[in-house]
Image (spheres, helix red, strand yellow):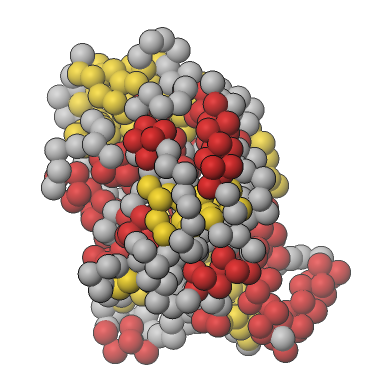
Amino acid sequence: MKHYDLLIVGCGPVGATLANLLRQKGYAVAIFDRETDVFHAPRAMQIDAESCRIFQQLSVIDRLVGKDARPSDRHVFVDENRKALMELRMHDLEETLGHPAPGLRFHQPALEHLLREDFRNDRGVDAYLGYEVLDVEGEGDVATLKARNTESNEVFEFSSRYIVGADGGGSLCRKYIGGTRVDFNYSRRWIVMDVHVHDDDLWNGLIDRSEFMCRADAAVVFVKGCNNHVRFDFEVTDEVAETFTEQDARDLISNYFDTSSIEFQRIAPYHFYAGMPDKWRRGRVLIAGDAAHLTSPFSGQGLNMGIRDAANLAFKLDLVLRGTVSSKFLDSYQEERWNHCAGLITGATERGLMISRKNFLGKLKRNLSFFIGHHMPKMAVAMTAKMSNQHAYKDGLLGEHALAGNQMIQPHVETPDGNQILLDDLTGSHFVLLQSSPVNSTHSDWFEKELGSSVLMMGRDFKDVTGKLAAFFEKHDVTQILVRPDRYIFHAGGDDADLLADLKAGLSAYD
Ligand SMILES: Cc1cc2nc3c(=O)[nH]c(=O)nc-3n(C[C@H](O)[C@H](O)[C@H](O)COP(=O)(O)OP(=O)(O)OC[C@H]3O[C@@H](n4cnc5c(N)ncnc54)[C@H](O)[C@@H]3O)c2cc1C
């Protein structure tokens, strides 16, 4: 039986991200997928600024932007005749996380290829592709897993300290954990169509946007993607779903553009649900990504939630695997992530129901809010961002300052050798105490050696070239900010000894 630090079931984008985050920390990771290659058609098309920041840590974002990702910020809600009811341009949103605030439109297969490429560049991850996981067990002193080679049918056994199931909507690991499904009241049938446009002139002429046609029980979502890919989602009744043909798809698309040069990559019926199991962990087995939460796709958050799971879990598994904290600390994963996801799923459900409203009063309310949004675009943009962006963590490993649970901003800073880089590239991916001005720091071996963390002082270790950090410190009336490895703020204040003592107490609360 081969032994690893961590076994990951499912090499979709979430599993592959987690594998890379732990590979960077030097752990031995094995990842399993029943498929040998990435899924050929995109599903997610939008990564938000926080996901970009996590991919920045993996040096993926620079390789993705250009051909396979670009900023995209225009959302248009239209009536049945494609007349605009409200247009949202998100470009005015302030960039605070080091990446465009509305995030990037991207090509999912390209992202997944990049994530897998990094397994090969480094010995940290063994990728068992073409292996179906049959069974997991997490109650003993080690976790175990059985996987079948899909070609030879041979079954192999593996053991590890922990197993993470990033095995998608039909998750075997979720079934192992058990628990009850919490329903978020969205359950509708859609046909998802992925189209490749061969004619470059036609492709270049398509306006870059996501368009939502509001229509009772027959809403349509149209998104211009990357690499000549266009997505149409078409809401259908059960009867239409049974009989939908390629000709129906072509007829629908011909309302948008000439279909003579298009090729279908897939036409697939989907049942979009919104729900989460109430348990994300049993012993040494945890779940992440679609295995842990399903949402309607209308806020573009399904994958983003999973990428955040990976960043949250990576830092916690690192501390547990190192023996710095007890395994109980892994309970804070669900404490933090569950409510966060619940907020986003609720927003996505509202948006999904809004575009296919049937009753007169519901439609009237929606059209009224669009009318207001159309005439006060700045307010509408701010409201939409609030609905689909990350909320702050309220529970978990957090201090008491009002900033705790929010994400740390990420401006550019200048290093002592004169390079301008993004803040995370300076801090690295561990706890960091940022200090706004020279103060008499108390040196802590526990913080710097045991936790492997660092203290960085503005003016001494880097220059705040944009002035944004100083302004942030001033706005919140603090001189010290203690940031977690997943870039969320643990605590802030004026006395470093107090902050470190609170962190120590926060971690020991999980003993
Ligand atoms: C139409 C549509 C549009 C979307 N748009 C967006 C968007 O714009 N933004 C966004 O953030 N999200 C979006 N999403 C959601 C997003 O695509 C998913 O949340 C994301 O792909 C989930 O990633 P994952 O890694 O958790 O799971 P998956 O991508 O499903 O990967 C799971 C992997 O596990 C493997 N697996 C499963 N069981 C086993 C087993 N027993 N043994 C071995 N391997 C196994 C599977 O083969 C698969 O490769 C959209 C989804 C859809 C359907």
In the image shown, does 203 or 246 lie closer to the viewer? 203
Q: Is residue 96 left or right of residue 266?
A: right
**Residue 350 visible to an observer of this rendering:** yes
Q: Is residue 27 above or below residue 143?
A: below
In the image shown, does 61 or 25 lie closer to the viewer? 25
Q: Residue at x 33, y 52 (%)?
A: 428
Percent across and percent down for residue 243 are 51, 56
Quadrant of the image containing the C terminus: top right
Residue 294: image quadrant is top right
Q: Residue at x 54, y 26 (%)?
A: 508
Percent across and percent down for residue 77 are 62, 78
Percent across and percent down for residue 298 are 57, 62
Q: Residue at x 49, y 69 (%)?
A: 469
Percent across and percent down for residue 378 are 66, 83
Quadrant of the image containing the N terminus: top left
Counting every numbered tag in the picture gives 0
Residue 24: image quadrant is top left
Q: Residue at x 25, y 24 (%)?
A: 4
Q: Residue furthest right?
A: 361
Residue 427: image quadrant is bottom left
In the image shown, does 11 or 139 lie closer to the viewer? 139
Q: Is residue 484 above or below residue 277?
A: below
**Residue 352 visible to an observer of this rendering:** no
Q: Is residue 220 above or below residue 454?
A: below
Q: Is residue 314 left or right of residue 507?
A: left
Q: Residue furthest front?
A: 440
